Amino acid sequence: MQVQHTLSIGILLSLVSLVSGASELPTMTVAKHSQPQWITLDAQLEAVKSATVSAQTSGRIIKINYDVNDIVPQGASLLEITSKAQGAELAAAEADFARAQAQNEEAQKQRKRYEQLFPQGAISQGDMDQAIANARASAQAVSAARARIIQANESLQYTTVSAPFAGVVTKRHVEVGETVSPGQALLSGFATEHMRAVTHVPLRYIDALRANPKMKLVLTNGKELESDALTIFSFADAKSHSYKTRIDLPPQEPNLMPGMWVKASFNAGDRNTLTIPESAVIYNNELSAVYLMQNNQFMLNQVRLGNKQGDSFEVLSGLSDGDTIAVDAYQVLLKLKQ
């Protein structure tokens, strides 16, 4: 069967069709022309904002409000940690602040009294200096106590972990009842409002991309997007010798999730190519061919086709500049059968 199939293709390729009135059939002269050279690469989507929320205080987890795959609004309470120790620290800091204020008031009053008595000679220079130093120290003690209140209040607020942005929870690192310490990972997630595509551009095309930094993206649903917000890394990967490139997508684009694959294309400059209309191509199994005119006769000529743009094909091999072919291959075939 394989031998018969090969013989049939060989006979078809060598067939010369002597069609009467061949000049009456519409023909075209193939000529090279300049057209953009589009390079298409695979790109993967990732979230512009993604983070892992960590604990900023120690304690035991008493409540988890969101789990994996939940949509979280910005500022929402993700989980809660016991706050008794932090509340006690705040109460102690407030008591220290009240005591420091009272001592400061007494020190300031004593300084004023000494300043009135010192010109009269009732107070020695040493006592006066001591009163001034005590007043300054008590004022600084008030500032330090106020700072401890701020610190204790922040520590108390850390017992309620809030979402830094609106998004989706992707991973939970802790369970209810677990004791956590500062720096321990709690929840991971990403923001859905803004995505970007990441691809790797080969070294031979990087100069063309830098000269014209614009990408066309084709999503899995067939929708096309364009973006000129590119971030091209200034160094190449040591193994692949390609440059990582980030392509920012328009915000609020629906139905996009990290991990999805898209096609990223960019113009790598112009080149001279041969193109023929789709109607000029005739197919036989996996063979593609055109009717080439030679000596006022149509001969079936195999061609290797490249990318399709609109209703035209790029010819990679099989034709030369100046060749004349039939515009409608099946019309020639019909004429041959008649």
Image (spheres, rainbow, N blue to C red):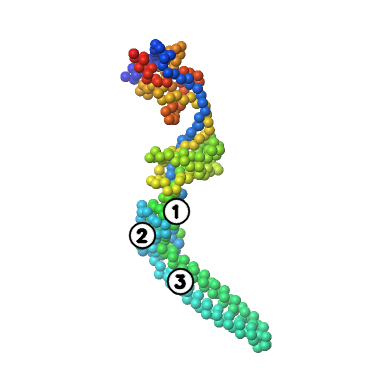
Residue 184 visible from this viewpoint: no
- Location of mark 1 (residue): 51
Whichever of callouts 2 and 3 sits on the residue coming sooner in the sequence is 2
- Location of mark 3 (residue): 90
Is there CB contact under 8 Å for labels 2 and 1?
no
Residue 82 image position (x, y, % from top left): 39, 66
Q: How packed is label 2: few (under 14 Cα within 10 Å), some, or many (20 or more)?
A: few
Q: How many numbered badges does the structure rendering display?
A: 3
Q: How packed is label 1: few (under 14 Cα within 10 Å), some, or many (20 or more)?
A: some
Q: Type of residue at label 2? A: Asn
Whichever of callouts 1 and 3 sits on the residue coming sooner in the sequence is 1
Residue 329 image position (x, y, % from top left): 39, 20
User: Quick one: SS at disc 3?
Assistant: helix
Is there CB contact under 8 Å for labels 1 and 3?
no
Residue 287 image position (x, y, % from top left): 39, 22
User: Quick one: SS at disc 2?
Assistant: loop
Whichever of callouts 2 and 1 sits on the residue coming sooner in the sequence is 1
Q: Residue at x 45, y 46 (%)?
A: 250
- Location of mark 2 (residue): 65
Q: Type of residue at label 1? A: Ala
* Residue 158 circle label: none
Q: Is residue 256 above or below residue 321?
A: below
Residue 55 visible from this viewpoint: yes
CA distance for labels 2 and 3: 26 Å
Q: Residue at x 37, y 54 (%)?
A: 71
Which of the pair 21/95 is nearer the observer?
Answer: 21
Q: Residue at x 54, y 72 (%)?
A: 143
